[in-house]
Image (spheres, rainbow, N blue to C red):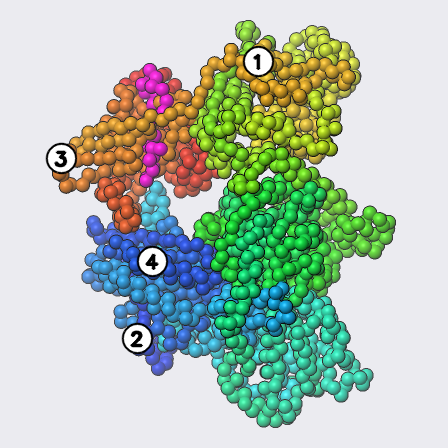
Amino acid sequence: MHPFTLAVKAHHVHFTNSFSTESSISKHRLTKSLGIPKPSPPLKFLTRISGFLHFNSIDLLRNSGSKVVEGLRFDGPVMDVDEIIDCEEGGLVVETCITRTLPPALTLEHGLESISEAVNKLRTDPPSSSSGVLRFQVAVPPSAKALDWFCRQPESSEVFPVFFLSRDMENPTSKSLYLNQSRGVFGIGAAVYFTHPAWCDSEERTKPKRYLSTNPIPITTYGFMDVNFNTESSCIKHEAGSFYFFVPQIELKELDDISILAVTLAWSNGMVCTFEQAIQSFESSFCQMRCHKPYAVGYSTILSESIVRTSAEPANFSDIIILVSSHFCSSTERYNPRYVRSALTKFNMMEDKTVQMVCMNAITLGRRDFGCDFMEMILSLTCNLMCKILLQREAPFSFQFSFRFSPTLGVANNMLDNAIGMNYSLGDHVNINAVWASLLIEECSRLGLTVAPGSRSSPLAVAASTHPLITCIACYDERSLAFHALGYARGSHRPAVIITSSGTAVSNLLPAVVEASQDFVPVLLLTADRPPELQDAGANQAINQVDNDLLQSEATKVMFFFSLPAPTDQIPARMILTTLDSAVHWATSSPYGPVHINCPFREPLDNSPKHWMSSCLKGLDIWTSSIEPFTKYIQVQHSHACKSYTYCQMAEVLELVQGVNKGLLLVGAVHNEDEIWAVLHLARHIRWPVVADILSGLRLRKLLASFPETEQNILFLDHLDHALLSESVKDWIQFDVIIQIGSRITSKRISQMIEECFPCTYILVDNHPCRHDPSHSVTHRIQSTIVQFVDFLLKVQVPHRSSKWCSFLRALDMMVASEISFQICADYSLTEPHVAHELSRALTSNSALFVGNSMAIRDLDMYGRNWTTCTHTVADIMLNSEFPHQWIRVAGNRGASGIDGLLSTAIGFAVGCNKHVLCVVGDISFLHDTNGLAILKQRMKRKPILMLVINNHGGAIFSLLPIADRTEPRILDQYFYTTHNISIQNLCLAHGLNHVQVKTKVELEEALSMSQHLGTDRVIEVESCIDANATFHSMLRKFARQSADHTLNVLSQFSVPDTISCSLSICKICRMEYSLYRIQLCAPPTSSYIDHNRSRFCREGFILSLYLEDGSVGYGEVAPLEIHKENLLDAEEQLRFLLHFMTGAKISYFLPLLKGSFSSWIWSTLGIPACEIFPSVRCGLEMAILNAIAVKHGSSFLNILYPLTEIDEEISKRSTSIKICALIDSNKSPVEVASIATTLVEEGFTAIKLKVARRADPIKDAEVIQEVRKKVGHRIELRVDANRNWTYQEALEFGFLIKDCDLQYIEEPVQNEEDIIKYCEESGLPVALDETIDKFQKDPLNMLEKYAHPGIVAIVIKPSVIGGFENAGLIARWAQRHGKMAVVSAAFESGLAQGLGTYQWLKEDVTTDPISICHNSCRGFVEASVAKATHILQNLQINNDVICKTSMEEQVLRYQLNVNSKDFCSFIKVQEIGQRIDIQDNILLFLHGFLGTGEEWIPIMKAVSGSARCISIDLPGHGGSKMQNHVAKATQEITLSIDVIADVLYKLIEQITPGKVTLVGYSMGARIALYMALRFSDKIKGTVIISGSPGLRDNIARKIRRAEDDSRACSLVTHGLQVFLDTWYTGELWERPLWEDLKLCSTPLLIVVGEKDKKFKSIAEKMCYELSHGEKGSDDLRNEIYEMVEIPNCGHAVHLENPLPVIRAVRQFLTRVNQNSTSNPESNG
């Protein structure tokens, strides 16, 4: 027998499902057909000859205090099909794991405390169940700690197993552990274990089968295949087909953007592990873990094991505060490579590459979709398992792990190579140079340093390149090499060593040393040198490197310098070690920075032998036999008195923070994930506005939800920089306390704002002691790690004040962001701001960004944006409620902010951080460091890097500076822009790099997308232009400033109390109602064809009345046109739905800002996707709300949208009217139409639009236009509208005939919108869009892109057709942006909506006061008065003569119906809406889902109640429905099978109506509805199946489901749902599948599924297949039985997530069913 394994990548860890089965004929055939290899040979670590290992069997020799934690035994972890088949009734047990997620913890220590408190609370209040699996998990900082934690476990561990499993799957090696940050999993103890020996005795087979189900949050199990590990006898055997898997008791799992600390408790009182024993076992594991957890390791602990370090005591403690850690700090928790080597040595690990440790999700097949053929699924699963195991056995390095079974037995794979056995024979070196060089390099290795050896430094280069644990990178350019080391130190937080030869090579290190010094990055320079006797003697390549002014200047600030003597055996060799240890200690102590050791060498520089005395090695025996550095630097924790003094110093800071009124959290450069994590904790705690610099990692964050409201717990001001362009904003925004985390800020305007806020409290927090205060405004300088500072502030409560101010800031940022996004997206050329705007799309949680200086970093800081991600990983689930963000690690050389060495730094950064790095630089920066491209070809352990070069052929930043306006272009080009024509493509070709040039947005998007999957380094060159870039930046600044001014003006007009909530709600809506109006028209509307048999024409619509709680009333109009996708019935349905949600809704002050405010409000307040509201309904809703706001504040509709400032008032007096364009339906003769046009001109109209394409021949239309132009002359603007009625050829023919008629434009000339641009180009006529934009509600800017063509001269905008004023404003701005006319057009609305152009059609109106439209003799055209329109809206009087009916929110009738069954009586709670009309079978009966009630259907019932009588019930066992045995003292439990429930419902329907009903069921209710449709067609007219299933087809699947349901029932009992479970779970609801019955179905079915519900979409498709292949009727008749509808943008609960499309689908289905019922009355019998 052979193991079946499945490897599935999830979070970049291989999860492997493993199971083995007893012999069976089917399995034998499968094995034979797949060609499964023979069992693998015995594992090496089980057969190695040693003092305690034996062939094939091992007994673990434990220490007296050690303990193998057995945990609770389960079968599995994947269910064995054969065993399930053989299980008798009750022989299958599935235990459900309950997972509790705790709030994210600031540090790992806090996470441990949080879990400890949860377990202690559980212990004091233990669960009532006799068995269970309970898991606590908490998100902790994401930096790599798992390997360090494993290595810190004691050699004499008391708890086993203990393991580390690396996530590195790309050919991992032991060297990668020392080069990169190795992420993985650390676990200890076993809460649950799974074993399956290849042999099973008869007793084993008869035992109940126990499996673990972890739905919905998966738990990972770890273990080995082909291993039989007997925990009781502590014996390991190699047995093909066996396995040993377990769930750790305590586990730290490191993912890309989060680490999860979890504890699992499992108990079963009937087995070996009781609840108390499980707690005790956990305490043993927890105690060991906590006593041996990782220290706070960072730069400073590469040499030392100190917990804190502080600088010398400052002179003035009132201004400078140094925080010390009281116990544990995690801001720079990093593992130290020397611990890895030490631990792997002391643990007595054995390397065995034949062993593969596998991990898998602890799942059961019961969680899978059993709507398909179960055995077919098993076969598919098994095939996948076999294919995966074959692939694994071909890969030599599938996994990297260390696993300790006991104190004396451990096995490792890809962990131990070169890590042990490093016994040094220094005496074997041929000369003293080699001895010294070897000592230096070995000590570097022990300190965890990476070496970058340059050429020509022979002794050091040879020693480094031959050292097994040293990773070497060589480059012919020492400058690039130094920057590469700098980048590595940035990425890994560990210093790298730079080795160079003597002479100018040392001076080439200067730029990188300057950057390292200025930005506190530790690097170690080992510079080879000539011996002293060759100095100042004219020797070749000999300069004075000891007194080198360049490297010893104040600018570079080398933290430590020492010039070693030339190697000699007269000096103890340990001097070399202590010198190096001291240098690295200086480099890694705050402030970090570069250190320099000069290393002179005499000849011979090669391996030529030369005698030396070994006496210099005296005292190194202990050092050579260990792997520790020679000198350990240890700093003692500060005394209690010092801590008390520090707290006293911080008291002032705390007092300032607690007393703040307007605080700002400013986040500068943040260097690692744990610091970002801490910043998020701080931001959530203090609730201040946050300005995140591009280098903070939070500027390009990704949201884990669909709308920005999820960010409300943290207020990010991403665009404050551009808001500050507004003088009014600068005057208004004043902070009283500013906390800056991290030193440098990119934005100049933010820095200027800080200066202008002075005097204010300005607190700067950073770990170095240096002054970073260019504005000289810092009042409190706190030297501390970010985590220490945040930990301090989290202990105090910070009041949340000035909500109005914060809300204004939020609105200001939203509007500026919207404007910037609009301008960038509306410009369809590839601009540099667009690159910055879109770049974060290409970044994932496994990515990092390295950003160049000059324009690159400024554009990203100003125009970068966050995105929404739809992933649903474990990390997302854990973070979404607390931190709905994914951050991106960002780095840059901002110490000296130079443009040299950036490519080399980025490559080094990629190696150090072990992520996919995207490097963004300008062309000049790229040219500065092209030698760095040579490093890309080095064989090193790193992921591919993507370099994006913005090539504007010069230095574009100078074009944005004042000097550009005052300097001749010739001088700018030559001396500032340094214009060039160098081919970047050829440079890439020379270095063998993949290169692609992009010139459009689409090309950029494609290049970025392809690069993510390319698997190799790549350069993307973005073509740009300096002048165009300067112009576009200037335009962005202009519109951002205008947007900021406008936002402040709109919000300032309202009297907002300071204590208002962050949503800035004006007041609540008291109620909403709507009235149907019908008004007479003078003539048929031009939107419809004329019915010559009709003499009267009318227009119908609805008037919305919105009542606020203060009595203010706002009116809106909903008047859909019949030619569009909605009709009056559709609109009324949505209005009925909205009546329910509008009552009590809060109106926000943001709404008059538009620009997405309404869409956001609709979703956040009403819970409806805005795009699903019909355009006319949304237009009326917006109008009513805005009018209500205007009435409440005594203003006008126009003024609340565009408030007048003092400057604007004079201008506004000249804009008090609107020019009106006349409209003619040209269905008469040319002479008659021309006569009408002449009359309109005489009335004062200067613009006329004529409807054409009403005739069959376009020539006739052309004759009309020609005649009209002849009569009215050329001073009148003529427009024509074809309403898409012509073919392309007809439109061309018309255009040819009227090309001399001087048309202003022709609207929608062709039927096919794809022909519009071609028509513009071929006809030469100006074209306007109308119907084309009607469907552009969801993404108008992208859909309008192709219509930016200059032949499109106008956009005709009907607010009621495109979805309201917000959408209309956006499209109008787009038209203005592209130099096109924005023509606002009417859709035959009433005077309420003030449809001006069509107002002449109205014979009567809904208002008693008509609109004033008249000729203005001064201006010479017909116009409408703005003042009059404002007066009408402010004093609106409804003409009640045109009102047909008024509708308000319907009340729900609630009552109870009693239904008698055979053994019991049901008291069913009923909810009813809708009139009881005469047609008894026009009834909808709604059935809810599992654990739901009938109340969830109320909104949908109210919407549909205009078409039917709507009834919902609480199903038996749910909500308010009760059951009672007929015999009062009966003890027998009531059994609820699906038959019983169907019988209850049948009798209930008989009470409701003598006729039929239409059922609507969701999930479980859908299953019941389907059952009734198939069984009781005499009472069921039709059935709507929402997210439903016919059940489980296979008997095995049903057996698994029953076991899982029993387990869930037990869990619910434990949590207090005893009454429900006693009735519900004793039934057999899921016993009977309905798949075969579908073929016989004669009842019409509507199958509704959510777009994102993949499982039920698949089930629905299979249901449709079965229905279409029924036994009765033809295919056409069968297809009429069913319809499938997919609801967009939602998952399983479609009726709750996106109800409006569901409402329409149900109503249309009901209409169709009723029509069929009427046409086939016999079917109603």
Q: Are marks 4 and 2 in contact (CB under 8 Å)?
A: no
Residue at the spot x=61%, y=36% of the render? Answer: 1051
Residue 171: x %, y % from top left = 51, 65
Q: Which residue is mark 4?
A: 121
Label 3, label 2: how far apart the Cα atoms are: 64 Å
Location of mark 3 (residue): 1527
The residue that mark 2 highlights is 59
Residue that appears at 72% across and 45% down: 1033
Dot 4 or dot 2, earlier in sequence: 2
Q: Nearer the viewer, mark 4 or mark 3?
A: 4
> What residue type is disc 2 on?
Asp
Residue in the image at 28% along x and 45% along y? 1617
Q: Is residue 1482 magenta?
A: yes
Element under label 2?
A: strand
Q: Up-down: is 575 above or below 1258?
A: below
Image position of 503 with respect to 289: above or below: below
| Residue assigned mark 1 | 1408
Under tag 3, what secondary structure? loop
Q: CA distance from mark 1 to mark 2?
A: 99 Å
